Structures are given as C-alpha cells and as structure tokens.
Image (cartoon, rainbow, N blue to C red):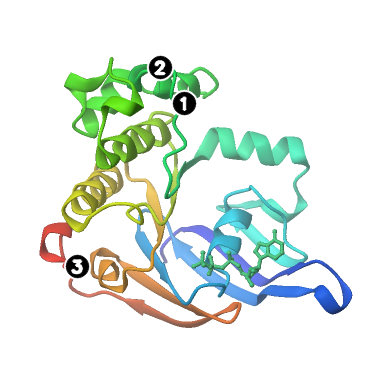
C-alpha cells in the first residue's frame, strides 16, 4: 500500500460561534499519498484554503484528526507546529510575499538560515531558471519571475510537502505554465508531495489526483490515469 503524506478523519473547522459561526470544514476524510501532485478544486468558500492551512500547520481544526505521515498534527503544541512547518513544509501563495528591499538571493537565504537541511540559495534559484537573476530585486522582475523566486524560497528548505494556494492566480497563462513546470520539476526531482489549490479547473490535468471540494467537504476524488504536461494544458 502507498505511504500517506497526509490523512484526515472527520476534520472540522468552525470559525466564530453562535449565529455568526461559519462551518468551513464539515468532517473531511482524506488520504494523500506521498510523492503525488494533488490539485484541489471547488467553488470560492468551499474550504480549500482552510484545509491547506490546517494540514500545513498554519491553523488548527475545531474537531477531528489530521496527520502528517505518522505525526498527529491536531495534538501538537504551537512550538511543535512551528517545528513541523520549518522542517517539512514549503508554502507558495498567489501574491509572492517577497521582501522588496532584498535581492532574489537574499529573499531565499532568509529561509535557508532557519531550515535544518537547506539547499544553497543560488542552487534553488537555478532550479527555477533564475540563475542570472540572483542579484535582482523583486521590482526588477516580472510577476512570473517573482513567483519563481517564491517557489525557490519554498523549495530551498528541501520541503517534504509543498503547498501552493493559487500559485498562478496573478499570472497570464504562458507565465503560469512556466510556474507549473517548476512545480512539476520539484515533484519529480525532489520527490516532494505538491498540493495545488486553483480556480483553473484545467490545471487538474497535470495532477496525479484531483480533489473536488464543495460546501466544506470532499465531493469527489479522481485519479488521473493520463497526466498532461503544463504545456499541454490550456486555461
Ligand atoms: N478567519 C476566518 N474567519 C471567519 N470565516 C472564515 C475565515 N477564514 C475563512 N472563513 C470562511 O470559511 C469558509 C471557507 O473558506 P476558505 O478560504 O477555506 O475557502 P476556499 O475554498 O479556499 O475559497 P477561495 O477559493 O475563495 O479561496 C468561507 O465561508 C470563508 O468565508
């Protein structure tokens, strides 16, 4: 049987209380095998980011269990969750969150300084095709290049899992494809499990597994028999 990167059982998240309570996750049961590319699709507000934040150790569930490999995330103290994120998790967001006053190299270096087993920042930047741009500042780069710096920053800590919340949301489709190619490379060369939340449904064609969310729960999980490359996908 495949080893699991993540399992959840009855995972529940309620924001607020009483009449203003929002049920963001309603008892999610999920298994994500190690080493896969998984795409999460679903309408706005269906709970995709909430799930990502909980299994990424950024937020806590209200009820249920979430585990990373053999470790129960729902039992962890704040300090343990921080350690989990540092050691295993890389994040890529829609807006790249780079420090404007630092070069590409320095932005990546910030993260490698606190990681256990980091890559050399310039090696990570070479991996995303930015070898020649290491000394450039974010303002000197295009959106796609900035997103690749953000991916290099996430990858440089040698993460076991890479969480990407709308990584191509702010990019045109040509630039988006180069970003998806980088994510595919990270999956193939580092063996990292990659989770991508997207509104571009066609991007599901590059995934091993597609999870369809609706109203705080999983509606359907589809395994792709024939994956496409990012170049073959249109959105
Ligand atoms: N901090 C919060 N406080 C209160 N409600 C929240 C909070 N964060 C999210 N929610 C609510 O929880 C529900 C799920 O939100 P979530 O962001 O997980 O959805 P999503 O599927 O990622 O949506 P989108 O595709 O728009 O990003 C929504 O109704 C949202 O308004």
Q: Nearer the viewer, mark 1 or mark 3?
A: 1
Q: Residue at x 40, y 17 (%)?
A: 106
Image quadrant where one finds the C terminus: bottom left
Give coordinates of residue 77: x percent, y percent.
Answer: 78, 42
Query: What is the CA distance from the residue labelled 1 to the residue labelled 2?
Result: 9 Å
Give coordinates of residue 196: x percent, y percent.
Answer: 39, 58
Residue 106 circle label: 2
Residue 53 circle label: none
Q: In the orientation shown, which residue stands out farthest toward the left?
A: 232
Q: Quadrant of residue 54?
A: bottom right
Q: In the orientation shown, which residue stands out farthest toward the right?
A: 18
Query: What is the CA distance from the residue labelled 3 to the residue labelled 2?
Result: 35 Å
Q: In the orientation shown, which residue stands out farthest toward the bottom?
A: 219
Question: Can residue 120 be seen at all in this image of the molecule?
Answer: no
Residue 227 circle label: 3
Asked which secondary structure carries label 2, the reply is helix
Give coordinates of residue 93: x percent, y percent.
Answer: 45, 47
Sequence-earlier tag: 3 or 2: 2
* Residue receiving disc 1: 99
Q: Residue at x 29, y 37 (%)?
A: 148
Task: Decide: is 46 above or below 137.
Answer: below
Residues under numbered marks 3 and 2 in contact, where contact means CB atoms less than 8 Å apart: no
Residues under numbered marks 1 and 2 in contact, where contact means CB atoms less than 8 Å apart: yes
Sequence-earlier tag: 1 or 2: 1
Asked which secondary structure carries label 3, the reply is loop
Give coordinates of residue 203: x percent, y percent.
Answer: 27, 66
Q: Residue at x 55, y 61 (%)?
A: 49
Asked if the beta carbon under badge 1 is closer than 8 A to the nearest atom of ligand 1, the reply is no
Task: Decide: is 99 above or below 97.
Answer: above
Question: Can residue 53 be seen at all in this image of the molecule?
Answer: yes
Q: Residue at x 16, y 66 (%)?
A: 233
């Amino acid at each position: 049987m495949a080893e699991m990167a993540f399992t959840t059982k009855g995972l529940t998240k309620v924001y607020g209380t009483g009449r203003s309570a929002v049920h963001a996750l309603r008892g999610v049961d999920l298994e994500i095998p190690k080493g896969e590319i998984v795409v999460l699709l679903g309408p706005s507000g269906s709970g995709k980011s909430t799930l990502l934040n909980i299994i990424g150790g950024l937020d806590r569930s209200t009820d249920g269990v979430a585990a990373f490999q053999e470790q129960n995330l729902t039992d962890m103290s704040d300090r343990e969750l921080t350690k989990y994120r540092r050691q295993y998790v890389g994040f890529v967001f829609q807006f790249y969150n780079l420090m404007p006053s630092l070069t590409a190299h320095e932005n990546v270096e910030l993260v490698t300084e606190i990681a256990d087993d980091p890559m050399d920042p310039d090696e990570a930047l070479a991996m995303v095709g930015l070898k020649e741009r290491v000394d450039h500042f974010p303002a000197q780069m295009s959106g796609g290049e900035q997103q690749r710096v953000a991916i290099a920053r996430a990858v440089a800590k040698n993460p076991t899992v890479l969480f990407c919340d709308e990584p191509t949301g702010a990019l045109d489709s040509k630039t988006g494809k180069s970003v998806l190619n980088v994510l595919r490379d990270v999956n193939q060369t580092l063996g990292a499990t990659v989770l991508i939340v997207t509104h571009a449904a066609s991007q599901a064609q590059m995934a091993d597994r597609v999870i369809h969310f609706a109203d705080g729960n999983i509606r359907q999980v589809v395994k792709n028999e024939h994956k496409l490359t990012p170049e073959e996908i249109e959105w």
